[in-house]
Amino acid sequence: MTKIIDNTLLDKVSAEAKESPRLRMNYNFHTSLDAKAQCLLNAVEPGTKVVIHRHMHTDETFVILRGRLNAFIYNNDKSIQIKKEINPLKGVYGYNIPKGVWHTIEVLEPNTVLMEVKDGPYTPITPDDILM
């Protein structure tokens, strides 16, 4: 089914994120967790906690549709390698994170929405994929 990505959809997913205890909500375009491509909107609110993690089987690409956030890339010793503000109003639209790279985000603005794309099938993060 064709789906228009407009303010109505972004507002809906953002409202759901605000109501979620995790302060984030996905809207999946893929129809199955087994799909070869995982494409989704991720509405995130300030205060959401995203652990430092990595994806060993896929790159992760995200493009910010609205709002702003800090993206962090880490070394194995948990030191910050890169900190970059992702803000479309400043001409910085997203990030491509290669597989195996430690990363997280810090949401800076309410109603922030990303479009994320990863190779499928969906693979949950294991304890080995979280940087403690």
Image: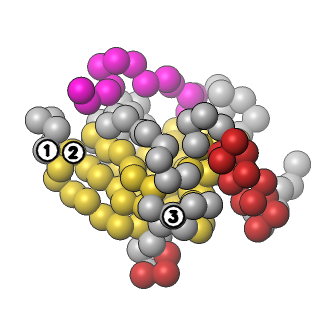
Q: Which mark is residue 109?
A: 3
Residue receiving disc 2 = 74
- The answer to whether the residues at label 1 and label 2 have Cβ atoms under 8 Å apart is yes
Q: Residue at x 35, y 56 (%)?
A: 71
| Residue 84 placement (x, y as % from top left) | 30, 64
Q: What stretch of residues is rendered in magenta?
A: 120-132
- Where, by quadrant of the figure, is residue 19 drawn? top right
- Residue 57: x %, y % from top left: 40, 31
Q: Nearer the viewer, residue 33 or 130?
A: 130
Q: Is residue 90 above or below residue 73?
A: below
Which residue position is annotated with label 1?
79
Are there few (<14), some (14-19), or many (20+) residues within 10 Å of tag 3?
some
CA distance for labels 2 and 3: 23 Å
Visible residue check, residue 103: yes
Residue pictured at 61% horizontal, 51% vertical: 43
Image: 128 above or below 27: above
Q: Is residue 30 magenta?
A: no
- Point out the image quarter for the C terminus: top left
- Prevailing SS of the magenta stretch: loop
Q: x%, y% of residue 16?
A: 72, 45
Q: CA distance from mark 1 to mark 3?
A: 25 Å
* Residue closest to the eye, 113 or 18: 18
Q: Quick one: 42 or 19, which is closer to the camera?
A: 19
